[in-house]
Amino acid sequence: MKKIIFLLLISISAFAQIEKAEPPFWYAGMNHSDLQIMFYGKNIAQNEVTVSNNIIIKNIQKTENPNYIFVTIDTKNVASQEIIFSFSRNKKIAFTKNYALKQRRENSALRKSYDSSDVIYLIMSDRFANGNPNNDSNKALTEKGNRDLPGGRHGGDIEGIIKNLDYLKELGVTAVWPTPICEDNDETYSYHGYGQSDVYKIDPRYGTNEEYVRMSAELHQRGMKNIMDYVTNHWGWQHWMIKDLPNHDWIHQFPEFTQSNYRMTTQFDTNASKTDAEGCMNGWFVKSMPDLNQSNPLLLNYLIQNAIWWIEYADLDGFRVDTFSYNDKVGIAKWTKAITDEYPHFNIVGEVWMHDQAQMAYWQKDSKIGAIQSFNSNLPSVMDFTLHDALNSVFYEDKASWDKGMIKVYENFTNDFLYPNPNNLLVFAENHDTMRFNEIYKNDFQKYQMVMTLLATIRGIPQLYYGSEIGMAGNKDKGGDADIRKDFPGGWASDTNNAFTKSGRTVEQQKYFDFTSKLFSWRKTKSVIHTGKMTHYVPQNNVYVYFRHNENQTVMVIINNSDESQTFKTNRFQESIQNYTYGKDVLTGISIDLKNDIAIEGKSVLILELK
């Protein structure tokens, strides 16, 4: 008899474990009311599933892998409560699982996102500040902290970001974009976070889920916003689901490893071969990042729910989406629409790394170019890479010609008609994947001023990269990614130079910081810059003049990219100057009479508020 009982217990235990339930909980009152919960455990699919409290099960889907079962319940008009899932075999309950439907924050669906009134600060999460040295390594994760290794884990974390939010506020920053902080358990080079191994869990070397929620709260207390760096195209090869796939087609698989051809133009090229288009979309980004198949409905819904869960749980204010244009474009358009249907004002900027405005405009929501192919990405914002390209060369072009000098910047804006919403473009001079522009321009402060002035006063949403505001440089060609992702000085207790404080900065660092802070703090309250119209004039003698204006205010921006002083008459700009008589320079406070000629030194800027 004992033997029979023992065998029975073994039999039940084989089916009595839920290792994961995802989403781990949900919220009542969501637009996404058909909630599909993924239960994972040894042979879990061999059980029948029921749920308490008269909740309706709309669908139960099993996969090729018996360790998964996807249960869809109807949460429409269901109040927040605890429900119980029962898993039965041979009409006997083997085990149960409590599941919470939580109360949403008030007005959660109508949350305000980031927009052109914001200044976004991009942080390399591992390299900004080590607020808690005790979490630099974790027993459960392979790669340990090693600050001596350029491409290793250095210890930057959530606590380090929180401790320096006042520094960012003083700088004029209104939104923070940290690189991915979900768990990445690659053996090496895991610090960048783009090879995630668990998308419901903050990497313990950065902190906890609760600390991430606290970071959002700390930002909101300061009137600042939290933007999550979200990855839809791939996971890391150590992701727990990659090791035990629900279905063979959960990821794109080939007889042998196939890397993406990276030719994003194949996604809309009417002459492209099918094999090339699939080679871009289905090929793996790199060998350690399995390519997710967004055309698989189960996977797509999993990604949709994960994104919505993080918005609701962590009270997020926006997304930046990595490698957006490498996804299955139909699938990613559904993902984006599902999120913006749930949160109508939620902004999402996609990384569309292309070098032609028409090609980038194709990916912005409601694009007329996309409409030619009956395609709408539903993506509110894209990154202005053509402007980035111009900014990284133009300030070495002291002598203007037909296609050299400030005409490059001017021409970038002449194509704004291609974009459905040019004011919702992310504008930047560098990021965590590009050469640092302080390196390109050899820490020439005058050129730094010109770059930053452009970013602060043109249409779109300016994005700064951590450390540039104190003169940080880095050469990607010589030192690799680690050189453009150096530790912020002062983020570690052992640092002798603490650039987070005025007393700790060098004279040079303070010069950079003071200029940046003054410029972007001024921008914070200037609706004429946030939403005003732009009128610009063809550059002459390498001097670019443009105006931002609305019914109440006009700002005149003058950038002299020549290495010589220039003097010019103002009558050419009369249609923009109108009845204004003088302008007060934002940076120096000096007043300039608009009835007389304007003189400007070489390699310098004027930002004139017209009076």
Image (cartoon, rainbow, N blue to C red):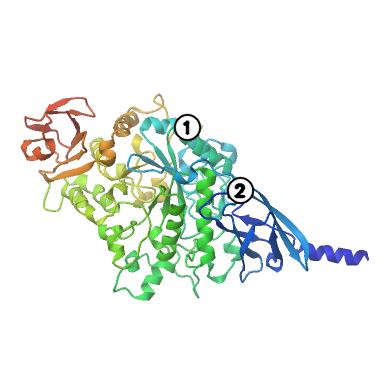
Which secondary structure, mark 2? Answer: loop
Residue type marked 2: Ala
In the rendering, at what x and y percent does residue 10 appear? 81, 64
In the rendering, at what x and y percent does residue 520 appear? 31, 34
Return the disc, 2 or 1, that comes first in the chain's sequence. 2
Which label belongs to residue 96? Answer: none
Position of 335 compared to 85: left or right?
A: left
Which label belongs to residue 221? Answer: 1
Position of 166 compared to 414: left or right?
A: right
Residue under the image location 27 percent in, 50 percent down: 422
Q: Quick one: label 1, few (<14), some, or many (20+) residues within 10 Å?
A: few
Q: Quadrant of the C terminus?
A: top left
Give the camera-side residue of 149 and 295. Answer: 295
Give the quarter of the image for residue 168: top left
Residue type marked 1: Gln
Residue depth check, mark 2 versus mark 1: number of the one nearer the observer: 2
Q: Is residue 130 visible?
A: no
Which label belongs to residue 79? Answer: 2
Position of 277 compared to 155: left or right?
A: left
Vertical arrangement, residue 481 with respect to residue 449, above or below: below
Q: Quick one: label 2, few (<14), some, or many (20+) residues within 10 Å?
A: few
Q: Is residue 7 visible?
A: yes
Q: How far apart are marks 2 and 1 (CA)?
A: 29 Å
Give the camera-side residue of 428 and 437. Answer: 428
In the rendering, at what x and y percent does residue 72 appear? 60, 61
Which secondary structure, mark 1? Answer: helix
In the rendering, at what x and y percent does residue 159 appear? 53, 36
